[in-house]
Every structure is written in C-alpha cells, then in structure tokens.
Image (cartoon, grey):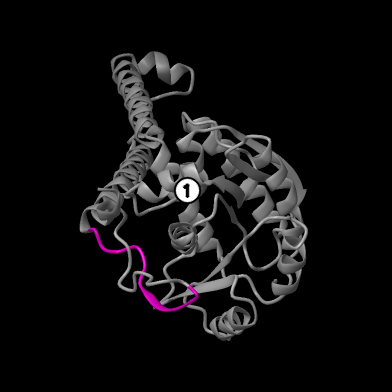
C-alpha cells in the first residue's frame, strides 16, 4: 500500500496527505504506520482504542482530513490506488462527488450475488438515486466532507450519506482486484449489518411493507373465514365435490404459525428502527483515539458529531 499509493501520488501533481486509520488491529499495522510517518511526514495516522467498525473508521478519517478533496480507499489494495488519478480528473471537471463503480468483483459467488441484489433493492426502496455497485472508494469535495462531518447519525452508511448530500455527482468504472494479502475481516455478519444500516437509515419502506403484509394476511384470513362459514352452511354440497368440512386442526396450526411468523417479522422491523433510535439518543462518542501520528491535537476521547454540528 505504501509503495503503490506513493507511486500513484507522485503522478498527481498536487500536494497531498494520507491519513491511515488503524481500527483496533491486532497485528503490526500501527507500528508500520508510525514508521511510514517518520519516513514521510505526509503519511499520518490514527489508532483507535478498540475496533469501532469500518464506517466509523472512515468517518474519523474524514473528520481529520483538511484537503480540498478527500479520497476514501481501503488499504487491502482491492481498490487500486492507480485509479485515483481518474477520480481527480472528474473533480477537476467540476464534479464534487466521484464514486468508483465496480465492473467486476473477484469475491465469492454468493457474496457477488448478494451484493448485486442489495444494491438494486436499496435503489428501489429509497427515494435517493443510489449508485449501483459503488463501494466506499470515492472522491469527495471539501464542501461535501464538511456537510457529512456535520451529520449527527451514528449508524453511518457513508455511501448513502454522500448521495443524500447532493452536489454534482458522477462515477468512473474500475475492476475490483483480489485482496493483496491476509484474510478479510469484513465477515458476512458485518456486511449484513452494513446492509441493514443502509436500508433502515434511508428508507421507511420496510415499515410500509409490514403494513402491506398485515393487510394481505388479514385479507386472506377474512376470505378463509368466509369460505369456512359457507362450507359449514352448505356442507352437503361441498361434500359432493370432495370439500366436506373437517376437524380443521392442521389448518388451525398452520394459520397460527403463519400469523405468528408475520407478527414476529413486523416486530423485528419495528425493533430495527427502535434500536437505532436507542443508539442515537445515548450520544456516546463515535470513536476513541488511543494514539496518533502527525495530527495536531486529535480528539482522544472521541467525537460526538451532534455536539460538533451544533
């Protein structure tokens, strides 16, 4: 990462800084970042007191960035540093948000299918023009970064926030490479949580779907009740066509389980929204900094973005 990003930056023809965020890693990441800062002061870093999550780490980098444009890029080299020049070209053309859209992914087939479905589902359920197949790799103008830093929410889905901010947006396509080394720490559980944050933070449609589902189930239950009543009243006629009234125990069990499942789904959707409200009202800082390199007086006890925006 040091070599490839440094070589790419040498071709940009602009002053730059690199802020590396160590999100509670258990290897020598922080030692290597400090060594890189000693060798090249343009490389700076933050080390969290524990793992606070990918989106929080990116938010911390945005909070401490000072450039006229900020590029978000992962350190595993799946987002090629050489593509940054193309993002800068679009920025020089006047675009304030430039996101990189993946033409090809080298992930597992199941992950590719789930990602493909999620982006299209999110696009359908949200009122915003969400970009398909665009990850966190992007360029943000300073104006956009200022707005995003002022947003107070804690369950941060940065891909949605940058779209919500508006401004002039465009995209460039690139081939997403394989991970350079190591095992990915972004497990299915973390990916699922990120997907839920994106869905529930930018759409109330799940609540409406729960309402629609309840109406459909109630409608079918009413029709079933009417059919049962008619079947009882005209038992002989129904018996002739093989639909004589029965004891109904299997039907009762199936109906109870079905209705119970629908109720639990609806309660789960409500719980997702209520849980996010609970996280918001606590107002704890988003991150806590254990150490830093090259950054003047970073906020070591963390940042409450709500307090900052006020």
Residue positioned 52% across, 79% down in the render: 25
* Residue sitting farthest toward the left: 281
Q: Residue 26: x, y in percent?
A: 52, 84
Q: Residue 275: x, y in percent?
A: 28, 53
User: Which of 275 and 45 lies nearest the eye of the viewer?
Assistant: 45
Secondary structure of residue under mark 1: helix
Report whether residue 43 is seen.
yes
Q: Considering only vertical position in the picture, is 240 above or below 108?
A: above
Q: Considering only vertical position in the picture, is 30 above or below 87?
A: below
Left/right of residue 171 with respect to residue 136 in the rendered view: right
Residue positioned 54% across, 31% down in the render: 129
User: Which of 165 and 51 lies nearest the eye of the viewer?
Assistant: 165
- Is 203 magenta? The answer is no
Report whether residue 103 is seen.
no
Q: Considering only vertical position in the picture, is 220 above or below 62?
A: above
User: Which of 123 and 237 lies nearest the eye of the viewer?
Assistant: 123
Q: Which residue is mark 1?
A: 145
Q: Residue 165: x, y in percent?
A: 46, 37
Q: Quadrant of residue 171?
A: top right
Residue positioned 35% across, 48% down in the render: 150
Left/right of residue 13 with respect to residue 42 in the rendered view: right
Left/right of residue 46 with respect to residue 280 in the rendered view: right
Q: Residue 303: x, y in percent?
A: 32, 63
Count every numbered label the image shows and give the total: 1
Give the residues drawn in magenta, as a range: 283-294
- Is 293 magenta? The answer is yes
Quarter of the figure with the N terminus: bottom right
Few, some or many C-alpha atoms within 10 Å of disc 1 (few <14, some 14-19, many ≥20)?
many
């Amino acid at each position: 990462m040091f070599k490839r990003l440094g070589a790419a930056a040498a071709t940009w023809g602009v002053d730059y800084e690199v802020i590396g965020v160590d999100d509670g890693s258990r290897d020598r990441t922080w030692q290597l970042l400090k060594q890189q800062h000693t060798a090249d002061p343009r490389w700076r870093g933050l080390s969290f007191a524990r793992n606070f999550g990918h989106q929080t780490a990116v938010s911390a980098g945005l909070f401490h960035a000072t450039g006229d444009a900020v590029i978000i890029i992962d350190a595993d080299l799946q987002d090629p540093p050489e593509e940054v020049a193309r993002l800068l070209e679009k920025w020089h053309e006047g675009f304030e948000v430039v996101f990189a859209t993946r033409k090809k992914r080298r992930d597992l087939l199941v992950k590719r299918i789930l990602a493909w479905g999620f982006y299209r589902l999110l696009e359908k359920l949200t009122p915003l023009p969400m970009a398909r197949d665009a990850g966190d790799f992007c360029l943000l103008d300073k104006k956009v970064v200022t707005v995003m830093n002022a947003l107070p929410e804690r369950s941060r889905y940065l891909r949605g926030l940058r779209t919500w901010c508006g401004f002039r947006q465009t995209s460039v396509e690139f081939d997403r490479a394989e991970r350079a080394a190591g095992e990915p720490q972004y497990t299915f559980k973390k990916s699922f949580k990120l997907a839920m944050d994106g869905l529930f933070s930018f759409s109330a449609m799940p609540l409406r779907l729960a309402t629609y589902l309840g109406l459909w189930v109630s409608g079918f239950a009413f029709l079933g009740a009417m059919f049962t009543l008619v079947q009882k009243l005209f038992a002989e006629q129904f018996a002739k066509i093989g639909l004589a009234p029965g004891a109904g125990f299997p039907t009762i069990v199936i109906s109870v389980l079905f209705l119970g499942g629908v109720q639990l789904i609806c309660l789960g959707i409500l719980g997702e929204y209520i849980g996010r409200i609970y996280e918001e009202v606590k107002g704890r800082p988003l991150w806590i900094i254990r150490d830093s390199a090259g950054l003047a007086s970073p906020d070591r006890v963390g940042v409450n973005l709500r307090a900052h925006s006020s």
